[in-house]
Image: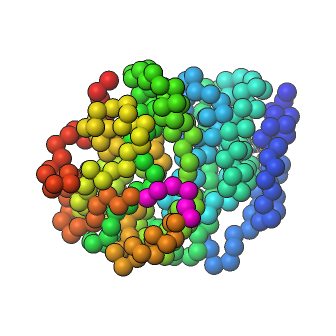
Amino acid sequence: MTEFELIKQYFASQTEHRADVRIGIGDDTALVNLPAGHELAITTDTLVAGVHFPIETHAYDIGYKSLAVNLSDLAAMGASPAWVTLAITLPNADENWIQDFCNGFFTLANRYQVQLIGGDLTHGPLSITVQALGHVQTRQALLRSAAQPGDLIYVTGTLGDAGMGLAIAEKRQPVQDQDVRSYLLSRLNRPEPRVLIGTALLKIANSAIDISDGLVADLSHILKASKVGAKINVDALPLSPELIQTLKHEDAVQMALTSGDDYELCFTVPPNKAAALETELTNMPCRITCIGSITNSPTLDLHNKDGKPYHGSLTGYQHF
Ligand code: ADP
Ligand code: MG
């Protein structure tokens, strides 16, 4: 197949068609309509084989995750995802591979009514660049820089699972139980971007970030941008039963604090909006957990439930 035939057959085959897309794939640019009173939210991420995912990762998972990490960034701003472009560099035109990639990509895109509106296809070492575009009401987006002392700090879902999934994928950690193994691998390969939670947090949260590099690293971005500190109770960190079953407790906690790729949201909420948050999130697909609060002093204080300082390493998980 030629480049154009591949585009037509696979990349232009999405079933989702948004009313706000006037021109999608096929012209020199796409043309879309931004709703009145909204700002455009734009993010991009590149995934390189062997760097951002193990070389043997399944094409479906690469397609899924290359979009998921971008939708997660939009969610962290409270933006509604709408459009996406895809620049893909392939070592060869393996149609089975492309079909699987598109299945993963479009499964997630359709779930959130995101339309692929353009891209590029080139020959070379496998690399995928996705740009996701969304919209959010003017001046309502959740910024890293707006956390306030006294805010409660929450995270969605559970932490550390994807880090454990990577340890399994890289054969650093044998896990015998097949259900546990496949849960942890799916948390690595198919993270659920917290799109609905992100938009539900508008007008409730003061600040938000998505956890791509690990809780401590990403929360620190909020603290720095907002010129505040935080107190975190490490015993409150949400850990999955699968992670608890796989690691010693102290290692699970360290994984939850430092390992990346979970794509959960970390956000801060003023105490007088905590009740509104509970109401808003009763219909949401995942749990949220309060893990601490924002402080005036410019430090990150990690302690256990008895108030004793946390002494584990924070330099990433090196045990295997
Ligand atoms: P141009 O040469 O004008 O950049 P191309 O010939 O590269 O256009 O692409 C033709 C059309 O197909 C464009 O609308 C482009 O956005 C789209 N396209 C190319 N590659 C992809 C892809 N991998 N996924 C989706 N759309 C693509
Ligand atoms: Mg081109």
* Percent coordinates x, y for residue 218 in the rendering: 36, 52
The quarter holding residue 129 reads top right
Query: Quick check: 191 left or right of 91?
Result: left
Q: Is 177 situated above or below 114?
A: above
Q: Give the total number of marks visible in the rendering.
A: 0
- Figure quadrant of the C terminus: top left
Q: Residue 97: within the magenta?
A: no
What's the residue at 25%, 61% (across, down)? 230
* Percent coordinates x, y for residue 95 in the rendering: 78, 26
Q: Is 90 situated above or below 47?
A: above
The magenta-colored residue range is 283-288
- Figure quadrant of the N terminus: top right
- In depth, the one of 292 and 82 nearer the eye is 292
Q: Is 42 situated above or below 163?
A: below
Q: Residue 287: within the magenta?
A: yes
The quarter holding residue 168 reads top left
Query: Quick check: 152 left or right of 298?
Result: right
In this rendering, does residue 13 appear at all? Answer: yes
Query: Quick check: 295 left or right of 192?
Result: left
In this rendering, does residue 29 appear at all? Answer: no
Dominant secondary structure, magenta: loop
* Percent coordinates x, y for residue 16 in the rendering: 79, 53
- In depth, the one of 104 and 240 nearer the eye is 240
- In depth, the one of 88 and 202 nearer the eye is 202
Q: Residue furthest left?
A: 308
- In depth, the one of 281 and 147 nearer the eye is 281
* Percent coordinates x, y for residue 60 in the rendering: 66, 33
